Amino acid sequence: MSVRVRFAPSPTGALHIGGVRTALYNYLFAKKHNGTFVLRIEDTDQNRFVDGAESYIENALEWAGISPDEGVKAGGGYGPYKQSERKVRYKAFADQLIAEDKAYIAFDTPEELDAMRERLKEARVANPQYNAITRMQMRNSLTLSAEEVDNLIAEGHPYVVRIKLPRNEDVRFKDLVRGWVVVNTATMDDKVLLKSDGMPTYHLANIVDDHQMEISHVIRGEEWLPSAPLHVMLYEYLGWEKPEFAHLPLLLKPDGNGKLSKRAADKLGFPIFPLNWVDPATNELSKGFKEEGYLSDAFINFLALLGWNPGGEKEIFSMDELIELFSLEKINKAGAKFDIEKAKWFNEQYLKSRSDEELASEFMTLLGEGIDESKAISIAGALKERVTFVKDMIVAGGFFFATPESYDEKTVRKKWNQLAVDKLTGFASHLKGLEQIDREEARDVLMRYLAEDETPLGRVMPALRLALTGQAGGPDLMAIIEILGPAEVVSRIERAIGTITLND
């Protein structure tokens, strides 16, 4: 059997990172088995359709490196890949189910449905449903004559098509993550399959599309697990072989208490969408992982391990390694706590592994002003071990672009003394007249100068760093001297000596 999987989001807003993880797991599984990853847009719910959401989904997956083999843009032999363009296909299957007494037409108004639920509540029914019992008290083709049904349709009365579930029958299927699942139809609804506007619900469209697109494995979020028995029944009713199912664990809040939501993420101050999203209704901006500075490969590595782990202590995996190691059997059943600090750690690791040239290019773009490329490369190399995001280099490396206006008070009190000033003056005199100096040469000049009277390096280095950066800590001091150049180093030493008051 050839592996064909699909990610089928609805264009009702920004793509939640839980959706990105679902897409990623489908992608990894497809690539692991030399299969096909399909992107299908499920836009049958026209009331919730949000303009721009479809392109957002496509752009988010592209940034994350999750490229569909088939889809609206990629094309393929199983299209159209947008459900609204497949509308004519669904009614025939609804009609087939009606003809075979596996579905029925229901004319109930919203008011009648509300009244039914209220009656059941008064009767202390814990979970009011339109089912094998209640359907016989409602207005549908099971309680009306064929003539009455035909007349109502001819008169233009709105109606829906509902599945006709057996009253008391176990539905069994094996989930590749959770094992055997057994649900009795007595606990299930006669769900709507075709809405009054002629559009299918998710349940019917999903099954028809998956069958016609020859989907072999349905890998989706845990929130769809309650619907799976209904889908199994539809496969059985239509006489089709059902795909394998795998329902993924939820992404939880950092404390593990409940599903991760936009509200929770906003409250805790971290993004929940892959890219920036502007809500067209409110014009509210929600920051994305990309715009917050996360590298796409770090984001994917972090996301892959939220609910799945290949075993062992290793945590850094390339996309190719993830593909090689991925298996549905190693997905956890329990929800995965979302840890933004771990996401930052992944970004730090990936940032360190980037070449200085790559980081310099991004750094220069963020800086938005003229900077020599070679200097940017050197700065990136000096700072990449000390920052979480490329944008942090602007703050962490501010002293590369401007002479310090202030100096760390604690270092001034403890390290700025006459000896330090004397030695800085002497070191500056050794640099005067030089056009450039590399870090090895800078260290050699300083060490030879201090060796003349055996002054310990530790008596001078903190004061030298203070003079050049205004800070107590930072990247390699000799690298800073190389990047600033001899003339600027001399200028900053002289300014510090003229500005900072001695403590002894």
Image (cartoon, rainbow, N blue to C red):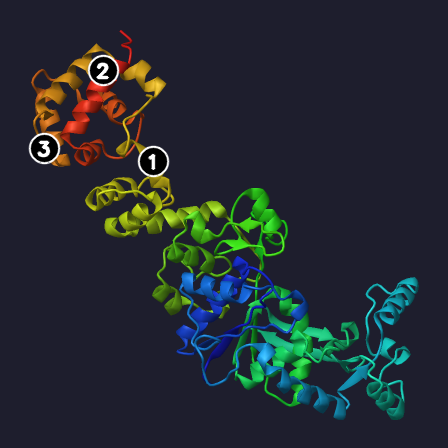
Placement of 69 over or under 101, stated as above or below: above
Q: Specify the amino acid type for callout 1.
A: Ala
Q: Specify the amino acid type for callout 2.
A: Ile
Q: Where residue 343 appears, x then y in whole percent? A: 45, 49
Residue that mark 1 sits on: 396
Q: Secondary structure at mark 3?
A: loop
Residue that mark 2 sits on: 497
Give the Cα distance between marks 1 and 3. 26 Å
Q: Answer with the quarter of the image where residue 119 lies.
A: bottom right
Q: Where residue 478 appears, x then y in whole percent? A: 18, 32
Q: Answer with the quarter of the image where residue 493 lies.
A: top left
N-terminal label among 1 and 2 = 1
Give the Cα distance between marks 2 and 3. 22 Å
**Residue ranking furthest to the top:** 504
- Work out whether residue 493 or residue 211 is closer to the camera in this orientation and state it: 493
What label does residue 435 carry, if any? 3
Q: Secondary structure at mark 2?
A: helix
Q: Secondary structure at mark 1?
A: helix
